[in-house]
Amino acid sequence: MNCRQAYRFICDHLDERIASPRCRAIRKHIACCPRCREYLESVKTTVRLYQTAPGPKLPHALHRDLMKSLDTALQPAARKAPRRARR
Amino acid sequence: MRLADQTDQQLIRAARKGDRQAFTALVNRYEETVYRFSFKMCRDPEKAKETLQDTFISVYRKLKTFDGKSKFSTWLYTIVTNNCLMKLRRRKIQELEDPLEVYDDPPGDDGSMRRAPIARWEETPADLLLVKELRSALDTAINKLPVDYRVVFVLRDVEGKSTEETARILHLSVEATKSRLRRARAFLRDQLHPYMVAQRETS
């Protein structure tokens, strides 16, 4: 088991509990290797920061605009392009 | 039964028959999700607004083609994702010239493989997210991530979809999804590395 194999495992699975013998061996390597452990922690922190970063709330004005645009776009007249009058 | 209490399937059936109120109830149920996802992908309020509107117009027009084999939310994510990708590709955002194959290898301390070597990151309590600089570092990093990788990261790690559902939404194989996710995680980690290490040194 080496750091390269552990690296793949870290970025593929983070700390998912996978029971295969290979995954157990990789987890054992990570437990003993400070370098891999630090790396695992930093990748986990990266994912956690993005997960917990607050997303924007839908502004009420946008909800209103959405309803208005749907009304316009989905009216039968809007769905069917009007024919041009022949001369 | 109130419309808000009906299942997605009940609302879809009614909306397909032309019931606009049932469709509005579906919009009310999912507009927040669609907007938040669009914003996280496009990183731009105007693009997120356009994507929100385009997505629900597409949903209404394509509702008859929804076969119910997958969850409605999976189908909806497919539509919103396509809309986001079309907008982002049209905008030609600044992307890395090189693909991210380099992130299949671990970083080296000597910088020979790529930058951002291993070093201990400062502990990051949740309230650190309130720090403007960190939010800016997160934004800058994800903006640099090519959109085909960003979409996998946002669906899988931010929205919490399973690898299989992410693959279905993007019409990718599970293996390709895993490979993009691995590279995206490693890329973002390396992008944040200088900021996190500087945090440690100044604290």
Image (cartoon, coloured by chain):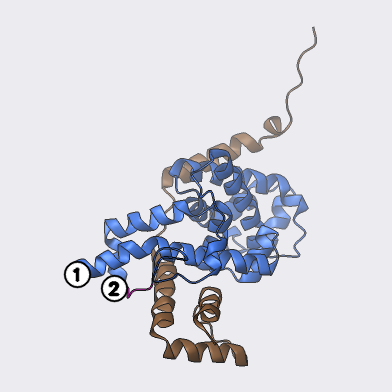
Point out residue A48 in the picture as x, y percentages from the top left corner.
41, 70
Say which residue appears at 58% left-offset and 39% top-offset. B90
Question: Please, which residue is most extreme toward the right here?
Answer: A86
The relative height of residue B1 versus residue B20 in the rendered view (above or below) is below
Residue B122 is inside the magenta segment:
yes
Chain letter corresponding to the colour blue: B
Say which residue appears at 65% left-offset and 55% top-offset. B78
Question: Please, which residue is most extreme toward the top here?
Answer: A87
The relative height of residue B135 versus residue B118 in the rendered view (above or below) is above
Q: Magenta region: which residues?
A: B118-123
Amino acid type at circle 1 is Ser
Chain letter of the residue carrying label 1: B
- The reply to whether discs 2 and 1 touch (Cβ–Cβ < 8 Å) is yes
The relative height of residue B55 versus residue B29 in the rendered view (above or below) is above
Q: Decide which of A36, A46 is in the foreground and name it.
A: A36
**Image quarter of residue A71:** top right
Chain letter corresponding to the colour brown: A
